[in-house]
Image (tube, rainbow, N blue to C red):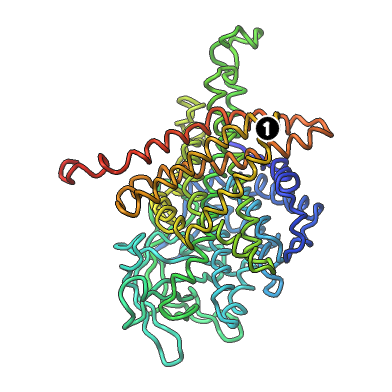
């Protein structure tokens, strides 16, 4: 059976030594997250993930969720009790404002906890993740009455939240949605339509579910300009906050999926359900994008989290499985064969996954800190710069971390040989669960197009210019440091490739849009590699600084792993640049009927 150990030491290294968390104490909530508080929170989150959630991961996969004849949906055995423990432990309100019952701590700590929960039980973690996303959307765009009514009960875990976008005929192109909203005399709306692929659409974990639903008000313009957002509770709420009659919302069926079986992915039917407008009429996407951006970062973490737990189990197996002898002679002469960890190709595979995981975790925390600055700083310029960087890198984080995270679960499964294909080992579940992250919250091809088509040119390229300046300054400041050259030299080359690719897109993408479309995914990967390389630069420098005053085997592995990334993974930027500069000619040349 698989196991999981939260990477607590790695998180502390990143927060304390790489990103200097205490330097952000001028931001709201950071001074409350002192080193001892952080240590306690991270330690307790690790314990909850390892001891409560991880044992339920296999249970959820085997049992799945059930829709009963009376329309009720039940979750796998143990999930309800675990959710109550999650709520009672205060985890749902960790970063929510204190005025609504939360603890008001930095969102960065929420992402740390999120990784642990996802690694231990991805399907379960989605119930809480979507609830926190719904809270975020309501806090930004909801009325005072909506915030006071819904958010405290979601913080308590009495109510959960969902996001309802997709319809049977309408996925990424939300302008095609048909769900209808009819305004009533009391300023409420009657919502009618069908939504599909709704994660946590119904369940037995909470007494109510707060659905955030995109719909078109009668008479509204066609396309995305006519979309509004509504809050539609599963059970209507009385003025005093008590539950009233059941609303016209029901789960029509539960999707039969490749993975995340423990999460109830529902077809949701809205039959004259009562809802209330969130934000302005016809500005629903603006409000929903708060939740979608939260979700995209969370989905990026899913890629990392599944890669991490798969890696941990692959390492344990490689140390235990005896097969063959080392090329340089027996390493375990007292045994019939050597453990497969002695073989270079096994080590290459494991080092590749490890080097990605550690840099991806750093990228996640770096981006989370940018998010905290964007939402909590009192300096308008700081907020703008942080928001720019988040907007630019969100599609990179979502697309690259989930694509590579999935590939890593497959590589980790490969370590087991035939045993990896057998369900009892747990590796094939990691593969199946990780696969969805590449698809939902905007399939990764869409993330790449968003990066190239919207994020690069936005505000005259202000964000990418700032990105080049930041990474370029790091390279310049450390170029003469002999100890840093193994990492900084390859990073400088990779950054040059990204700058060349950007200039090529500026020159060739606008005039021939297919060039931009054909280059988009390679450009996203190139951007991701440079960013992960920058993270390794920061980590290696921090490790060297610490090692100058204290010995640490943990930090020595950082130096080796960072060098491995620079030598064997970062050079892939040259491949992506070559593909980008090849243009769209052969990609678009064949007529459709030739396929």
Residue 519 shown left or right of residue 147 in the figure: left
- Which residue extends farthest bottom? 185
Q: Which x, y percent locates residue 67?
A: 42, 60
Q: Nearer the viewer, residue 64 or 334?
A: 334
Residue drawn 70% across the image and 62% down it: 90
At horizontal 50% and vertical 37% (from top left) the residue drawn is: 409
Above-or-below relation of 471 to 106:
above
Q: Is residue 325 visible?
A: yes
Q: Residue furthest left?
A: 593
Callout 1: 10 Å neighbours few (<14), some, many (20+)? some
Quadrant of res 119: top right
| Horizontal arrangement in the rendering, residue 140 relative to residue 557 (left or right) | left
Placement of 201 over or under 399, stated as above or below: below
Determine whether, in the image, residue 516 is placed left or right of residue 14: left
Residue marked by disc 1: 484
**Residue 553, image x, y percentages:** 75, 29
Give percent across and percent down for residue 86. Answer: 65, 58
Q: Quadrant of the N terminus?
A: top right
Residue 351 shown left or right of residue 595 in the figure: right
**Residue 429 visible, this angle:** no
Query: Residue shown at 36%/60% (left/top)?
Result: 172
Towards the viewer: 487 or 547 = 487
Query: Which residue corresponds to the image point at 54% horizontal and 81% vertical from the top-left?
Result: 237
Q: Quadrant of the C terminus?
A: top left
> Which of the 4 image quarters holds residue 318?
top right
Image coordinates for residue 10, horizontal then vertical, percent: 69, 41
Furthest residue toward right:
549
Q: Nearer the viewer, residue 479 or 35?
A: 479
| SS type, badge 1 | helix
């Amino acid at each position: 059976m698989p196991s999981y150990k939260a990477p607590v030491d790695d998180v502390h290294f990143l927060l304390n030594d790489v990103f200097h968390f205490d330097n952000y104490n001028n931001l709201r909530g950071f001074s409350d997250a002192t080193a001892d508080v952080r240590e306690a929170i991270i330690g307790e989150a690790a314990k909850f993930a390892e001891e409560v959630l991880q044992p339920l991961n296999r249970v959820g996969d085997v049992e799945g969720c059930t829709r009963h004849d009376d329309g009720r949906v039940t979750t796998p055995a143990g999930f309800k009790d675990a959710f109550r423990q999650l709520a009672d432990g205060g985890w749902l309100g960790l970063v929510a404002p204190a005025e609504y019952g939360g603890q008001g701590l930095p969102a960065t700590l929420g992402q740390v906890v999120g990784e642990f929960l996802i690694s231990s039980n991805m399907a379960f973690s989605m119930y809480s993740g979507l609830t926190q996303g719904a809270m975020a959307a309501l806090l930004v765009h909801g009325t005072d009455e909506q915030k006071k009514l819904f958010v405290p009960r979601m913080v308590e875990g009495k109510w959960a939240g969902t996001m309802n976008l997709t319809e049977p005929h309408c996925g990424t192109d939300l302008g095609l949605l048909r769900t209808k909203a009819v305004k009533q005399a009391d300023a409420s709306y009657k919502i009618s339509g069908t939504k599909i692929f709704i994660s946590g659409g119904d369940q037995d974990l909470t007494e109510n579910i707060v659905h955030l639903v995109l719909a078109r008000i009668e008479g509204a313009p066609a396309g995305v300009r006519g979309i509004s957002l509504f809050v539609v509770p599963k059970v209507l709420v009385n003025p005093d906050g008590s539950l009233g009659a059941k609303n016209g919302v029901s789960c029509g069926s539960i999707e039969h999926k490749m993975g995340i079986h423990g999460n109830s992915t529902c077809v949701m039917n809205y039959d004259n359900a009562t809802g209330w407008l969130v934000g302005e009429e016809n500005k629903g996407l603006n409000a929903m994008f708060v939740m979608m951006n939260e979700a995209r970062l969370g989905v990026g973490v899913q890629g990392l989290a599944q890669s991490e737990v798969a890696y941990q189990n692959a390492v344990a197996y490689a140390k235990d499985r005896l097969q063959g002898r080392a090329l340089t002679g027996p390493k375990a002469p007292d045994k019939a064969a050597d453990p497969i960890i002695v073989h270079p190709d096994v080590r290459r595979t494991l080092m590749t996954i490890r080097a990605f995981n550690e840099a991806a975790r750093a990228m996640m925390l770096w981006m989370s800190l940018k998010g905290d600055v964007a939402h909590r700083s009192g300096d308008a310029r700081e907020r703008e710069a942080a928001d720019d960087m988040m907007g630019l890198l969100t599609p990179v984080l979502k697309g690259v971390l989930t694509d590579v995270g999935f590939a890593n679960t497959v590589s980790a499964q490969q370590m087991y040989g035939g045993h990896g294909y057998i369900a009892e080992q747990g590796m094939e579940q990691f593969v199946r669960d990780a696969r969805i992250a590449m698809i939902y919250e905007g399939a990764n091809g869409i993330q790449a197009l968003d990066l190239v088509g919207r994020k690069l040119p936005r505000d005259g390229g202000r964000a990418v210019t700032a990105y080049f300046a930041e990474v370029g300054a790091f390279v310049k400041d450390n170029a003469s440091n002999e100890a840093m050259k193994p990492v900084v030299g390859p990073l400088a080359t990779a950054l040059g490739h990204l700058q060349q690719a950007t200039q090529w897109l500026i020159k060739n993408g606008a005039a021939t849009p297919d060039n931009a479309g054909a280059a988009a995914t390679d450009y996203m990967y190139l951007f991701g590699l440079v960013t992960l390389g920058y993270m390794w630069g920061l980590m290696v420098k921090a490790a060297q600084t610490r090692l100058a005053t204290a010995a640490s085997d943990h930090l020595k592995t950082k130096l080796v792993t960072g060098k491995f990334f620079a030598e064997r993974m970062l050079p892939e930027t040259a491949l992506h640049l070559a593909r980008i500069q090849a243009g769209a000619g052969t990609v678009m040349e064949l007529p459709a009927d030739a396929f």
